[in-house]
Amino acid sequence: MDRNCIITGANRGIGKEVVRAFAENGDNIWACIRKPNSDFENYCGILMDQYGIWIKCVIVDLSIEKDIIECMDKINKEKKSVDILVNCAGIGHMGLLQMTSSENIRKIFEVNVFAIIETCRWAVRIMSKQKHGIIINISSTAAEETYVGNSIYGSSKACINAFSKSLAAEVAPFGIRVNAIAPGLTDTEMSSIFEGNNASLPLERTVLGRKLDPKEIAEVVIALTSDPMKMINGQVICVNGGSK
């Protein structure tokens, strides 16, 4: 399909599966990762050989605005179209507000909220000139859930839901679509944060009765970038197998 995609949080969890899915789909990728990772680079090499696409690893600390700007400017200098942006990077958290430091709260919001806003702001500038583009922000069902310990993480994801909906209305005249995907508990390194001392507790909130596979989220991402889904815009797509 010869599309060019930017994927943040690309080297693990949902992000890594999104990289695989786009490569399989024949798309080129800028894979944004926080620090060099030889295992991930080898993984990308295998995908490139298998699917005949290019994947470029871009180092960026999403908690630092300067890093984000430099990363996006580096991509822009390649003079290629930016057809898709998928924001997968995020920080998980479970804890009482009074027991959570201000520093930790700020870090969560820097990555989960402000980094997404900054990457979207940059992408919208490029996509507006192109008159086309697709943005998908990975949120969480935690944005709509009420339980002890979810005040910080849940509110950060609720910000992304509201942001994505309003941005979609703002940029639709330029041929840009914006949606969010809200996964339930997914089988990644982050899942242990939400399981705490009782791994079965989060599963009690879903009729699925199991964790989601990251591949299942990646499949929804790919579907949302397809032509048959071009009328899906400004939505938060819940993917959790059904809530109790």
Image (cartoon, grey):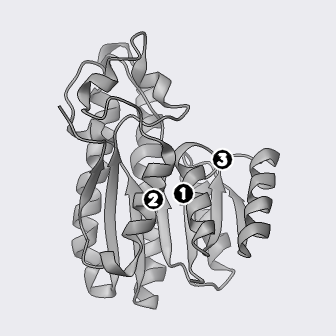
Q: Nearer the viewer, mark 3 or mark 2?
A: 2
Query: Where does label 2 land, which residue?
Result: 219
Spatial CA distance of label 2 from label 1 is 8 Å
Q: Which residue is mark 1?
A: 18
Specify the label residue 34 is tagged with. Answer: 3
- The reply to whether residue 113 is in sight is yes
| Separation of marks 3 and 2 at Cα, in angstroms | 24 Å
Residue drawn at x 82%, y 47% is 38
Going from the N terminus, do you reach mark 2 or mark 1 first?
1
Q: Residue at x 28, y 58 (%)?
A: 163
Count the labels in the image.
3
Disc 3 residue type (three-letter): Arg
Residue 168, image quadrant: bottom left
Which amino acid lies under the numbered mark 1 shown in the image of this protein? Val
Label 1 secondary element = helix
Residue 130 percent coordinates (x, y) = 46, 89
Is disc 2 placed on a helix, strand or loop?
helix
What secondary structure is found at the residue carrying circle 3?
loop
Which mark is first along the chain, 1 or 3?
Answer: 1
